[in-house]
């Protein structure tokens, strides 16, 4: 049977709805766009355009994978974040809109041609550091991850965004081996889910995203216990830090950074009005 764009979209939406997928309308559209090489506008303005048999088969395959709860980002191999498109796979956390709070903060605290040194701990796909560097051409960045597979994805993204001359991506265990007081800004979105909670997460996350990107230890706070003093150590005096948190972790993470010597430590909310990013500064040198 020949399929056109609107029929294919409707059929895919129905299959995803019947399969209990949360966002069948958007997911069906994204899968159709990729399978039929069509834009969102094409679906609206040219709804009777016919799919080739190959495109129909590709869409079927995508819908099957989605019904097995594979995230759309993994099926398509890409995800939009802030103003960039990133390659992703099952070795990196799929970048979340919540994380854009950190990008927004750093861009608001810096000016377009400011030269600064940025460190991203747990760089994953490169979402945070690459989004910032793309808008701050005089800045330089270092992204660290313990996963070589994640670093391969970050390196592909840096090359695709033409940012190789601004960013270094290195394997490491958080700040191990980094000198004191070297960075103007340090950001991190560490794993912060309590180990026991991981089994209760949606299959898209539990079965398809790397444990290394999720597991924050018994209470989800283990990485912050390491990161708070270490971030304060590698920051220059007067430097800015920002770390993403789970929405119930604000008080605990603020306390860790305050105890480590952070100044003006506070929490920024995300667009859903949930606590999302703990930020502050390192004490400036006395004048
Ligand atoms: C929640 S993901 C964040 C990825 C990316 N920054 C983002 O916001 O989408 C956490 C990342 O921290 C990395 N990671 C976990 N433990 C680490 C460690 N000890 N040292 C460095 N990176 C680590 C993981 O491999 C993962 O890529």
Image (tube, rainbow, N blue to C red):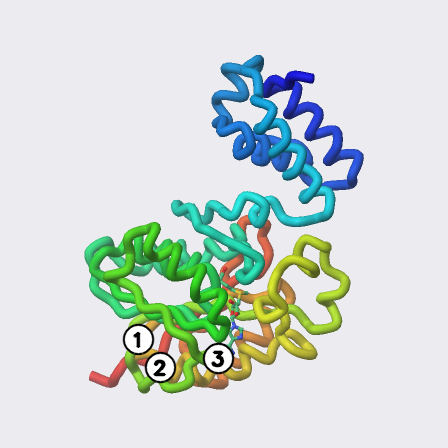
Work out whether mark 3 precedes mark 2 in sequence or the reverse, and give the earlier one: 3
Identify the mark at residue 183; answer none if there is no mark. Answer: 1
Q: Residue 201 appears in which quarter of the rendering?
A: bottom right
Labelled pair 1, 2 in contact (Cβ < 8 Å) = yes
Residue depicted at x 57% and y 49%: 74
Q: Against 184, is 46 above or below?
A: above
* Among the 4 quarters of the image, the one containing residue 224: bottom right
- Label 1 and label 3: CA atoms lie apart by 14 Å
Q: Quadrant of residue 58?
A: top right
Label 2 SS: helix
Q: Nearer the viewer, residue 49 or 261?
A: 49
Q: From the image, tell me which residue sits under label 2.
A: 234
Q: Which residue is mark 3?
A: 227
Q: Report whether the residue tagged 1 is closer than 8 Å to ligand 1.
A: no
- Total count of labels: 3
Q: Is residue 154 above or below residue 227?
A: above
Q: Residue shown at 29%/56% (left/top)?
A: 163
Q: Is residue 78 left or right of residue 57?
A: left
- C-alpha distance separating marks 1 and 2: 6 Å
For residue 242, above or below residue 163: below
Name the secondary structure under disc 1.
strand
- Residue 266's x, y, as percent? 48, 68
Could you tell me which residue is drawn at 49 percent across and 75 percent down? 146
Neighbor class of circle 3 (other Cα within 10 Å; few <14, some 14-19, many 20+) is many
| Relative to 7, 73 lies left or right | left
Which of marks 3 and 1 precedes in the sequence? 1
- Residue 239's mark? none
Q: Position of residue 212 (x, y in %)?
A: 59, 71
Residues at discs 1 and 3 in contact (Cβ within 8 Å): no
How far, Cα to Cα, is label 3 from label 2?
Answer: 10 Å
Residue 136: give x, y in percent of width and height: 26, 56
């Amino acid at each position: 049977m020949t399929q056109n764009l609107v029929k294919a979209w409707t059929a895919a939406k129905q299959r995803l709805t019947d399969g209990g997928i949360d966002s069948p309308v958007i997911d069906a559209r994204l899968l159709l766009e990729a399978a039929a090489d069509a834009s969102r506008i094409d679906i609206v303005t040219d709804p009777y355009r016919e799919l080739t048999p190959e495109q129909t088969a590709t869409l079927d395959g995508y819908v099957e994978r989605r019904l097995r709860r594979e995230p759309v980002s993994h099926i398509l191999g890409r995800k939009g974040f802030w103003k960039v498109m990133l390659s992703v796979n099952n070795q990196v956390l799929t970048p979340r809109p919540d994380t854009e709070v950190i990008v927004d903060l750093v861009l608001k605290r810096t000016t377009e041609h400011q030269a600064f040194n940025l460190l991203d701990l747990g760089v994953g796909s490169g979402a945070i550091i690459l989004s910032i560097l793309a808008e701050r051409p005089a800045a330089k960045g270092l992204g660290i991850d313990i996963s070589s597979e994640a670093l391969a994805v970050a390196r592909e993204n840096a090359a695709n965004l033409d940012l190789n001359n601004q960013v270094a991506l290195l394997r490491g265990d958080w700040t191990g081996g980094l000198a004191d007081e070297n960075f103007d800004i340090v950001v991190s979105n560490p794993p912060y889910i309590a180990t026991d909670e991981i089994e209760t997460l949606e299959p898209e996350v539990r079965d398809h995203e790397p444990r290394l990107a999720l597991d924050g230890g018994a209470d989800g706070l283990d990485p912050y216990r390491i990161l708070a003093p270490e971030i304060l150590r590698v920051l220059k005096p007067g430097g800015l830090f920002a770390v993403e948190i789970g929405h119930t972790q604000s008080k605990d993470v603020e306390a860790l950074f305050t105890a480590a010597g952070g100044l003006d430590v506070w929490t920024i909310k995300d667009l859903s009005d949930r606590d999302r990013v703990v930020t502050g500064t390192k004490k400036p040198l006395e004048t």
